Image (spheres, grey):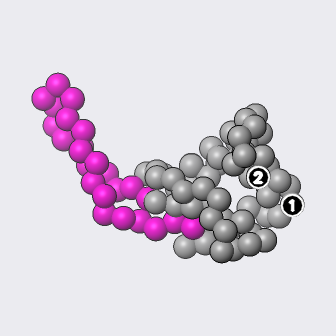
Amino acid sequence: MFAGQIDLEVHRNVKGESVQTYKQYIYGLIDPLQPEAVRYVGRTNDIEMRLRTHISEAQSNFTIKDVWLSFVSFSTSMSNTVRS
C-alpha cells in the first residue's frame, strides 16, 4: 500500500450543528510483484484500520480486488506491500 496525506478538509454540518473537519488520506493497493501496478485507490481517515478492513473483507468477498488481495496476503507478507 502507498499512502499520501492530503490537506482535504471534509465539512459536515447537520441540522445547524458545528462543522467538523478532519484530514483524509489517499492510498493505493499495489502489487508487490509488480510495484508499478496500482490495483486499487481509495480515501480514508485511518490508514491502518482501512488496510485491516481490506484484508478482513477479502476473506469473505469475491470481487477482483478481494481475490487479488487474498492471493497477495498468502503469497507475501503484507508489510512488503506498504510504502509511503
Q: What element carries label 2?
A: helix
Rendered residue at 67%/68% (across/down): 37
Q: Position of residue 75 (x, y in %)?
A: 86, 60
Residue holding disc 2: 68
Estimate the spatial distance between the alpha carbons at disc 1 and disc 2, rounded to whole Å.
11 Å
Q: Which amino acid does label 1 sit on?
A: Ser
Taking depth in this image into account, of 15 and 34 the one nearest to the observer is: 34
Question: Where the C terminus falls, by quadrant?
Answer: bottom right
- Say whether residue 1 is visible: no
Q: Left or right of 64: which side holds 21?
A: left
Amino acid type of disc 2? Trp
In the picture, the quarter occupied by the N terminus is bottom right
Where in the figure is residue 10, as x and y percent of width and height?
28, 48
Q: Position of residue 6 (x, y in %)?
A: 36, 64
Image vertical order of residue 73 relative to residue 4, above or below? above
- Badge 2: residue crowd in 10 Å (few <14, some 14–19, many ≥20): some
Please give the range of residues in magenta.
1-25
- Please name the residue shown 83% across and 53% down the image: 71
Is 13 situated left or right of 56 in this image? left
